[in-house]
Image (cartoon, rainbow, N blue to C red):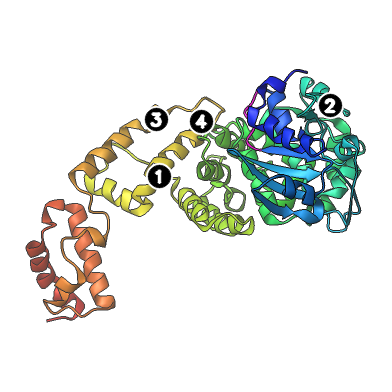
Amino acid sequence: MRIDHLVPAALYDFGAVLARAGFQAWIVGGAIRNLVLGREPSDWDAATDARPEDVMRAFRRTVPTGVKHGTVTVFWRDLQIETTTFRVEEGYADGRRPDRVSFTPDIREDLKRRDFTMNSMALNLATREFLDPHDGLGDLGRRLVRAIGNPLERFDEDGLRPLRAVRFAGQLGYAIDGPTFEAIGSSLHRFRAVSSERVRDEFAKILLSARPSYGIGLLERSGLLAEFLPELAACRGVEQGGLHSFDVFDHLAAACDAAPPVLELRLAALLHDLGKPGRKAGDAEGGFSFHRHEEDSARMVKGILPRLKFPNLVTERVERLARHHMFSYSDEWTDAAVRRFVARVGEDLVEDLLALRVADSAALAGTPPEPRGVESFRKRIEAVLAASRVLGVKDLAVSGDDLASVGVPKGPVMGRLLAELLETVMDDPSLNERERLLLIAERIKPKYGLS
């Protein structure tokens, strides 16, 4: 396999520095896989027989990122190269890190410890030899994710590897080798020890793949999904009827496919109907209803995403999307109703909410997303906001200090009076002038026990 011409010249210069010092240097791992697939590597990993101290002597700019396990990050030209000494690992009591690491002069021994065959190829930076002892190239041609050697042993070494198998399959659209897939179910006890942060990172990559429903299906069939997202697994078999062609689980997976590849949107598409199983009820026509399921879905999002260590901002946005996804716009809405909708949802979320509606609609029967379905509402919102952007108390032409000047004490009463003024301006934006609002405030003060 010829990929050496795709390697940046700076990397060969990096290898030459180690070669002059008497050491080997190989590019390994995901960078080689991506070059074989014709993709741009996102980072560069090097393997060498040089010890960490040798690497740090050879290069001026280094960071000892994992010296105990033989890893030094080298900053070379415009590259950041994670450089690790050939090593053999033994014992994995915590299901992640080796109990013992010993260095070896043999690159082949080093490649044995890696997870999947597609990640066990290497390119020598001095001789340009391409090394593939576990037929990773063949598995890429077969579009197959396969563990090196005994998959149970590989998964026992790191409990995250079962999820990584699904992630690679999902990202690449590959199948998982039969014995490798079967080993996932037998390795769930190891997976349970993996930190939420590591699970989150792999799960996010699955969601941002070209067709996340494929990876989600693998998660479900392997048993992994029930381990870290049982609320979604519980949606399997919950029929919906009506316009829906799928149960809740498949509807959510299809919505995730139809949503733009933005993390908050993919999460919202996947989680927005989680409340349906608990709200399912029969109706008079023999169908089903899920009254107020969006409230339960939003509440569940607030529990799930922090549990998986997603950032607070992501949780907050996905929760709002789930809470408001059941809006029902019609041309009969008044301008005031449109303004109240935007104020309730948040102007920052309107575009995402419309995108979620498009994905949700496409997932009724698995049809392609059709943005035109929300276009009239989008144009109406744009026109209404162009006329008036008074959406909150902060947008009023009066402040708390203004009201205090006419005898309104600061505190709850002032808050309620400001809220009433906001409702007034929502109905008639022309009233948003300081003097007019102060006159209105004077008229309604008696309602609040003020003279």
Q: Which residues are magenta?
A: 38-43
**Residue 241: image location, x then y, percent:** 58, 36
How far, Cα to Cα, is label 1 from label 4? 16 Å
Label ID, residue 327? 1
Q: Earlier in the sequence, mark 2 or mark 3?
A: 2
Q: Earlier in the sequence, mark 4 or mark 2?
A: 2
Query: Relative to the observer, which residue lies in front, 301 or 126?
Result: 126
Q: Quadrant of the C terminus?
A: bottom left
Label 4 Cα crowd, 10 Å radius (few <14 / some 14-19 / many 20+)? many
- The type of residue carrying mark 1 is Phe
Residue named by callout 3: 373
Element type where label 1 sits in the image: loop
Please say if 130 is above or below 276.
above
How far, Cα to Cα, is label 4 from label 3? 10 Å
- The type of residue carrying mark 4 is Ala
- The type of residue carrying mark 3 is Gly
Residue named by callout 4: 362
Element type where label 3 sits in the image: helix
- The type of residue carrying mark 2 is Leu
